[in-house]
Amino acid sequence: MKLTFSPASPFARKVRIAAIETGLIDKIEFVPATVAPGQANEDYSKITPLKKLPVLILDNGDVILDSYVIVEYLDELAGGGKLIPASGPERWKVKSDHSLLQGMLDAMLLCRYEGMVRPEPLRWKAWSDDHWNRAWTGMARFENKPDVLSGPFNIVQIGLVCVLGYADFRFADCGWRKAFPKLDAFHQKMLERPSVKISAPPPA
């Protein structure tokens, strides 16, 4: 299998953590890829018209996307139930919590593009502030979710690690650690886990 990725992508990081945790990391070839708004990449568009990282390319050429679906595929390949509950109410709770985290990452990425890629005269502050507030309000919600912060290591904890790591990486002065001490303690604990430590993004 081949995984397109960038060390800076929190979505690719999610899959890398899952691959380590499921014991499948050695079965995946990591293929660096670069995608950016406003920049053509015809070769990558042939793999996925969305031009998003990551995608998993199977040995038969089939393409699996997005990051959550890839994690679900790896979890099933490893026997199922390790990172995503196989059935029952807990499965839907985990999937819903992860969807919130996925949306938070999407919002943070849009803020990054607005502030760093869009020409300054065209930037829309109210739009950017609204998206940042979505991520910030999401952090506040997880600050008050002890079942997530102290629960089993699953796709929700992985997603939360990726949100907080991306906040450190791209928004180092946002102050999330001071605002959310429980998330800070959770993140520090997670950094002791090899899969989380190894996959951390490079210094910005």
Image (spheres, rainbow, N blue to C red):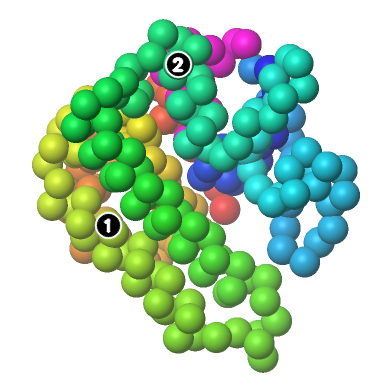
Q: Which mark is residue 139?
A: 1
Name the residue beneath numbered marker 2.
76
The answer to whether 99 is drawn above or below residue 136 in the figure is: above
Q: Which mark is residue 202?
A: none
Q: Is residue 148 visible?
A: yes
Instruction: Report whether 153 appears left or right of 1.
Output: left
Q: Is residue 161 visible?
A: no
The answer to whether 167 is drawn above or below residue 202 in the figure is: below
Instruction: Report whether 158 appears left or right of 198.
Output: left
Q: Residues within 10 Å of mark 1 (few under 14, many from 20)?
A: many
Instruction: Report whether 32 appears left or right of 137.
Output: right
Closer to the camera in the image, 176 or 146: 146
Q: Residue at x 29, y 41 (%)?
A: 187
Label 1 sits on what residue type? Met
- The residues colored magenta run 14-27
Give coordinates of residue 197: x percent, y percent. 43, 30
Q: Quadrant of residue 120?
A: bottom right
Give coordinates of residue 62: x percent, y percent. 72, 25
Task: Label the magenta part by its dominant secondary structure.
Answer: helix
Q: Quadrant of residue 30?
A: top right
Label 2 sits on what residue type? Glu
Q: Residue at x 15, y 46 (%)?
A: 145
Instruction: Report whether 173 appears left or right of 27.
Output: left
